[in-house]
Image (cartoon, rainbow, N blue to C red):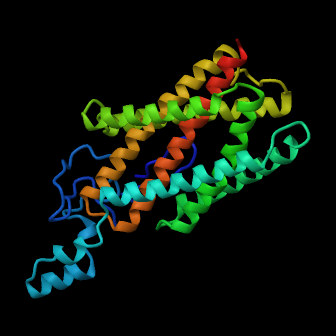
Amino acid sequence: MRSSNPVFSRRGFSRDNGYAGFHAAPQAGGPAVGTQGNPYAGAYAGAPTNPYAQNPYAQQGLQHGAPPQAPAATDRMTMDDVVVRTGATLGVLIVAASLAWALLPVDDANINRSYGVAVVSGLVAMVLGLIQSFKRTPTPALILTYAALEGVFLGVLSSIVDNRIASGAAMQAVIGTMAVFVAVLVAYKAGWIRVNRRFYGFVMAAALGFVGLMAVNMLFMVFGGGDGLGFRSGGLGIVFGILGVLIGACFLALDFKQIETGIAYGAPRREAWLGAFGLTLTLVWIYLEFLRLIAILQSDN
């Protein structure tokens, strides 16, 4: 079963090309985890062992009677791997956003050009994100290019909102995003959030409904003009902005579970890029919802 967020569908650590089963045991030598209620491992419902253990080294070890875990352990994903790659991805995004803010002015003489660059960058970033989502293995260059282009889009959009609609909105959105990340991480580690099938189904249903309503609203805006159905402005805009942040927070919990499961089941080190990619997508989603929400609140005052 794939783990998805409200923007892109992405593959998780339990894909159909050799990932841990729902009732599979963690890789020998790895941390022990419960095998019941794992929503990320639906492809191997009856697998008696962890598919990650089925590698040439493990087979060689079984043939010669040697422990198979030691050779494979050197290439297993760790939390440090995820942290480093997430830092690199977010670092590229932040640098690109800062450069876009500084080099693409949003004054009356240049706003159309800057806005055009932002739209093109955002569309290309979306395409790259979709390509990575459907690839069987993570491609670091693709993920970092996505982060750079997404950074350009966010930099220009943030500059427009901050300079022309709501002063200080960008920094407030950054602080809000960081606060949500820390709060969800603490709640997840403390066991206050339990990611299971019911949680996964609830979040996915809420996200699909949210995205569907936003798509309908956008169509009404394009063909009918104005604010469409009003889901992104006024009182309804505030309600849907808060709902968007809450959905993003739920997807952070899914991301944490996905990463934890990958580590526990001995995912290859390269899969840390998937964790970084997923976290970046979710944080971008939360930031955009905060930015829109702050713009609505300040424009109404």
Residue 16 visible from this viewpoint: no
Please tell me whether residue 197 is drawn above or below residue 280 in the rendered image.
above
Q: Is residue 247 left or right of residue 219?
A: left
Front residue of 183 and 197: 183
Residue 205 lies left or right of residue 13; in this view the side is right
**Residue under the image location 89 percent in, 36 percent down:** 108
Q: Which residue reaches farthest right?
A: 109
Number of callouts in the render? 0
Judge whether 86 appears above or below 50 on screen: above
- Which is more toward the observer, 201 or 53? 53
Give the answer, above or below, for where 89 lies relative to 252: below
Q: Is residue 86 among the parts visible in the rendering?
A: yes
Q: Which quarter of the rendered picture does the C terminus lie within?
A: top right
- Percent across and percent down for residue 175 are 51, 32
Position of residue 31 in the picture relative to residue 146 (left or right): left
* Residue 143 x, y percent position in the rendering: 55, 61
Name the residue rendered at 26%, 63% in the picture: 266
The x and y percentages for residue 200 are 39, 38
The residue drawn where x is 15% and y is 64% is 29
| Residue ranking furthest to the left | 65
Residue at the extreme top: 301
Relative placement, left or right, of 33 versus 246 is left
**Residue lying furthest bottom:** 64
Q: Quadrant of residue 141?
A: bottom right
The residue closer to the viewer here, 128 or 87, is 87
Based on the displayed image, in which of its 4 quarters is residue 186 positioned?
Answer: top left
Please provide percent x and percent y for residue 152: 69, 50
- Height in image: 86 above or below 55? above
